[in-house]
Image (cartoon, rainbow, N blue to C red):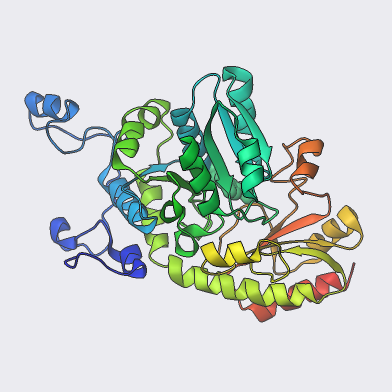
Amino acid sequence: MDKLSYEKETLYVHKGYSSKNHQGSLSVPLYQTSTFAFETAEQGARRFAGEEEGGIYSRLGNPTVHVLEERMAAMEHGEGALAFGSGMAAVSTILVHLTKTGDHILCTRGIYGCTFGLLNILEEKYNITHDLADLTTEEKIEAAIKPNTVCIYIETPINPTMEIVDIAQITRIAIKHGIQVVVDNTFSSPYLQNPLELGADFVLHSATKYINGHGDVIAGILVGKNREDINKIRSTVQKDYGGIISPFDAWLLIRGLKTLHVRMDRHSNNAADIFTFLKSNPKVENIYYPFDEGNPQYEVAKKQMKTGGGLISFTVTGGINNAQKLMNELRLIKIAVSLGDAETLIQHPSTMTHSVVPEKERVEMGITDGLLRLSVGLENSLDLIEDLQQALSKI
Ligand code: LCS
């Protein structure tokens, strides 16, 4: 890449790699190796001392993984990135990095079920407490911050309620209090939303989802505003907790990223079509979609997201029984957790992704027993609507 700056779609395809240094290989080479041979004992010593660039051992760094990290840092406008073996490894690494015993983490009122589980482990084992709070207005954010709050951890849109929080508003208040902000950007992908641009300190992804896009990898990404923070985490929590990605999975993510923008446009258009269909169906009671003009956070969603994304949550008349019946009647749409794949997936959060959250907290998060979450895929939206229509007609 010769020019100093390129448009983001160009970076998704090229950033961090030059075929000139790799015998002309157009595809990024896969360095499927656990370790790197040194030419001499002295060279090994220099590499360990950080005096010479080069491979040591793939838990500490790998050239294929490095391309993925460079590309993700550019996509999220950060100075550095780290790749992990799962989204949860990225979540746990940043929370362990930012906290110590006695600290407090403030979260959005909804979060992914396993992030909720992790927060409880941190509280039970290390007395790192947390609150889940409504962070939709300045007054509410200020009221939720405690003297020992060191981190505000947000999802937006929130999984699975699709609630939106204003990232810029939260970061403005956090900066005033000297608190770090971490945004889980899984639901939007870097193509739709860039939290670091809005003042966040870290952004993370379950790369299992849109980043990969093909439903065949579990992975995570953490991007930092500052290179020093990322280098510090690389040489401490990531290295010593060890939740790193495999080179092959990094290679698959590099391949997935090349089509991220094309896929996200299609996911978003399909979801917009399905939203219009579901909104007018009498059996659909409530619908949650960021670009619904009736959504109280619509203006915020418009401000910080490029499109409404590919996810829609909804409830149907008849509660959990009809919700499960609807799922069972679908012919094309698959019943599966995860999201961001080419295939359209439907899941039932209260018995699946968020079943680990106790009922009281689940209801406070807005996850009712009748709620369904649809991850709209890349099929033709007419086929998806037909499938939903025939299933809805049977409940
Ligand atoms: N953050 C969010 C917002 C997620 O949705 C998930 C997984 C994670 C983090 C964890 O990522 P993983 O370790 O699975 O790569 N969400 C899932 C979901 O909604 N259905 O299945 C998994």
* Residue at x 13% of width, y 32% of height: 38
Farthest residue, direction right: 318
Q: Nearer the viewer, residue 147 or 243?
A: 147
User: In the rendering, at what x and y percent does residue 93 appear?
Assistant: 46, 33
Would you say 170 lies left or right of 17 here? Answer: right
Q: Residue at x 27, y 68 (%)?
A: 6
Along the horizontal axis of the image, is 204 left or right of 238? right
Q: Quadrant of the N terminus?
A: bottom left
Q: Is residue 260 visible?
A: yes
Considering only vertical position in the picture, is 292 above or below 322? below
Q: Residue at x 83, y 75 (%)?
A: 281
Percent x, y of residue 251: 35, 53
Left/right placement of residue 219 relative to residue 357 reads left
Q: Point out residue 125 in the picture as x, y percentages from the top left corner.
A: 59, 18
Q: Nearer the viewer, residue 235 or 250?
A: 235
Query: In the picture, which quadrant includes the C terminus?
Result: bottom right
Q: Is residue 102 shown above or below 144?
A: above
Q: Residue at x 49, y 36 (%)?
A: 177
Q: Residue furthest bottom?
A: 382
**Rendered view: 51 above or below 190:** above
Q: Quadrant of residue 49?
A: top left
Image location (x, y in percent) of residue 287: 76, 64
Callout count: 0
- Residue 271, picture quadrant: bottom right
